[in-house]
Image (cartoon, rainbow, N blue to C red):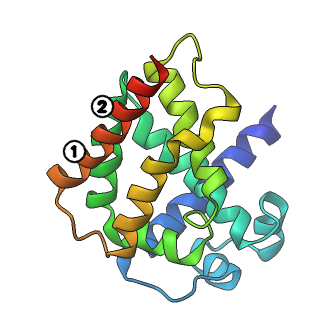
Amino acid sequence: MENINSINLTQLHLFSTAKEALSSRVMMKYTITDLERQSQKGRSVIYYHFQCMEDFYFELFEKYIIAEVTKGCSSYEELVVSVVDFILSNKILCQNLANLSNILNKPDYLLNKFASCFNKFELPDNKLKPSQYHLMGGIVHTIQTWFEKDLKLTKVEMVDQLLEQGDLLRNYLK
């Protein structure tokens, strides 16, 4: 039991270290060596938890960012506002994660994440089946385009676009 807690604490430390570094400036690369030096954890400790930096980025996104963004949300509308607020409040971090990882280039991964949240908040009877997750493509495309345009849209514009995508999906599933 104690070992599990130390693993979680170690991962939290690595995530916090990386989040701080990736929030400071736009980076062309962030390596295991960078994480090792900044976290003051040995390379073997990092590799014990993550196979490579790509795995680290996905875990950071999954366990740290998604958890933070979805906390307190009880509807799709609240989730959209929370996602947009998080991205705008953490522009450099989010741009670095988008540029340094393949998260935005893995539409199936993002489709599954959004579909899961949409089901949780909007479709408690799980009307959206895994075979229909492609319907979330408009939401994923909207976010990918926002990043490609260096997050130039305003909060209101982005929220409106994502809510419109959700409305289209809701209407389709009726």
Q: Residue furthest bottom?
A: 28
Give 14 or 84, whichever is nearer the viewer: 84
Residue 83 higher or lower than 126, as above or below: below
Q: Residue furthest top?
A: 125
Image spot of residue 173 (x, y percent): 48, 22
Which mark is on residue 78?
A: 2
Image spot of residue 22 (x, y percent): 46, 73
Image spot of residue 87 (x, y percent): 33, 57
Which residue is painted at 81% across and 41% down in the image?
A: 3
Dividing the picture into quadrants, the one containing residue 146 is bottom left
List the residue tagged with mark 1.
160
Lower sequence index among marks 1 and 2: 2
Residue type at mark 1?
Asp
Give 72 or 102, whichever is nearer the viewer: 102
Give 81 or 111, whichever is nearer the viewer: 111
Image spot of residue 110 (x, y percent): 57, 50
Measure how far apart labels 1 and 2 are at the Cα level.
12 Å
**In this rendering, would 132 be left or right of 72?**
right
**In this rendering, would 138 be left or right of 30?**
left
**Secondary-structure class at tag 2:** helix
Badges 1 and 2: C-beta atoms under 8 Å apart?
A: no
Dividing the picture into quadrants, the one containing residue 35 is bottom right
Which residue is painted at 29% across and 39% down in the image?
A: 164
Mark 2 nearby-residue class (10 Å; few <14, some 14–19, many ≥20):
some
Query: Which is closer to the viewer, label 1 or label 2?
Result: 1
Give 61 or 110, whichever is nearer the viewer: 110
**Secondary-structure class at tag 1:** helix
**In this rendering, would 152 be left or right of 3?**
left
Residue 54 higher or lower than 159, as above or below: below
Residue type at mark 2?
Glu
